[in-house]
Image (cartoon, rainbow, N blue to C red):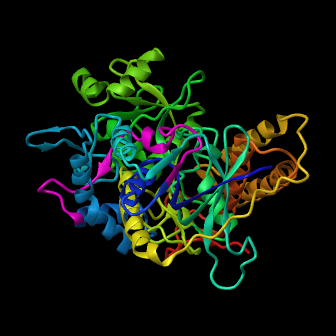
Amino acid sequence: MNTEHLQYDYLIVGSGAAGLLAAKALAEHGSVALMNKGEFTDSNTYQAQGGIAGVFDADDSIENHVADTLRAGVGLCHEDVVRQVGERGGAMIQKLLAWGTPFDGNDEGLHLTQEGGHSHRRIAHAQDATGRAIGETLWKHVQTQKNIHCFQHHIAIDLVTSHHIGHVRGKNRCLGAYFLKSDGSVMSIAAKHTILATGGAGKVYMYTSNPHAATGDGIAMAWRAGCTVRNMEMMQFHPTCLFHPHAPSMLLSEALRGEGAHLVDALGHRFVFNYDERGELAPRDVVARAIDHEMKKQGDDCMFLDARGLGEALILKQFPNIHQRLMALGLDMRTTPIPIVPAAHYICGGVATTLAGETDIEGLYVIGESACTGLHGANRLASNSLLECLVMAEACSQKVIEGTSKQASMAIPAWDDAGIVPEQERIQIKQNWDEIRAVMSHYVGIVRSDLRLRRAKRRLMVVQEEIANFYWRHPLSRDLIELRNLALVAELMVRSAQQRHESRGLHYSTDYPQPLPIAKDTELMPE
């Protein structure tokens, strides 16, 4: 196969908030290739409803934000990182405002809302579509930059490092990556610096709030390249995802509960206070487990979110997009409680990085949800994720700019597809995809056990062997690349869960129901 070869100063994979801001910042210092495997709006950022946390109210303080984050993280947060991110929250929101982000507010200031785990109102938002507002604002700026070259429908296959091509002396260095184009051909991009901003891995579960693209690509590629991963067992389940047999997954923002919506069972009884004195405003791990426990105890398929008490005016003003999408399904939250289930939402673990996205490999940075900086610990505090994405992108860009003049690009070998034969059928891809998601949902969900984890690992090893045999023999496709990544991320999550012999935050084990006296990260390193 003839491989198209391109070269840039900076290669950015992913076009959510982190990737867009990094591209915007780096374009003034060199050429940028901005890659997305789908459309540029296909990211978790564009799905984010609630908002972005920052201290603005006179009654609030950075210390309060730090304390809330540490409390939610149940002892596993890295306090220095929490403090650095918290200190930059207000300034980052001010920058977004200056760039044109349409946050809700008036001449007197921003309208701030409150979400679970927060002790004060500090969530800046754009109605119930904050991520989309931020993404569209940054995308407008990116499109005006001549130095940014945007590639849609180019899915990353793998990173290329110096060790991979035989340069084994010295520290391993990232040289760029291979990409599969929409026409089936392969393109290589060499870069002085490569930034992975590929988002999360929610599609590893059957129920998720994430878009289809969230298949853990960056985490899997970084692992194969030689990076350490941290706390991969910490998958956050959003408590309130629409339960509807004939509709795609839909998130019902935590801001609804922040404004006073209640969680009830089929008889209308509020139940979360039975599990935590904070009720619906408890952190997400507590609320999700409460819902899961009530569903199992009562034998019901779902619980309900009752927003009727908010009143029509507030619902239409602050949650118009959620309201419209529900109405299209024949559901009116002004008059009827909405059926909900917990769904995989955000992975708090990921590639082990600094706040600037630095990894074990020179020239490779990972930012946003694919990274694990220590901010979220054992449970992410609501609306800290968009903040982390943007703070990391800014810090990463500064670090990259400092080192740009010291680096030189190296040539990447042509893609080798020798021995590839056309597949006879593709049913194996669908079968493996469905099996991974079923195994993870049944055995590695909100509640785990040693037995469930052993069963999950055993089956995932078989599935990975089947995928590898298919992958190396047949032509590449987007769904095959995603399947390979999904299977690897699932394995890393199970292996990490088996390391944690306690219950802490998002990881609850029936075999180890109590937390250990000292909280420690779990880490896995490639052999």
Q: Nearer the viewer, residue 84 or 145?
A: 145
The image shows residue 207 at horizontal and vertical percentages of: 59, 38
Left or right of residue 86: residue 424: right
Which residues lie in the magenta part?
33-62
Please tell me how many numbered marks the rendered image carries: 0
The residue drawn where x is 59% and y is 60% is 233
Residue 417 in sight = yes
The image shows residue 350 at horizontal and vertical percentages of: 56, 62
The image shows residue 333 at horizontal and vertical percentages of: 37, 22
The image shows residue 319 at horizontal and vertical percentages of: 31, 29
Q: Nearer the viewer, residue 287 or 9?
A: 9
Q: Inspect the magenta stretch and tell me whether residue 340 lies in it.
A: no
The residue drawn where x is 54% and y is 32% is 249
Residue found at the very far top of the displayed protein: 330
In which image quadrant can residue 450 be found?
A: bottom right
The residue drawn where x is 59% and y is 56% is 218
Left or right of residue 77: residue 297: right
Q: Nearer the viewer, residue 257 or 158?
A: 158
Residue 501 in sight = no
Q: Nearer the viewer, residue 82 or 394?
A: 394
Q: Main secondary structure of the magenta part?
A: loop
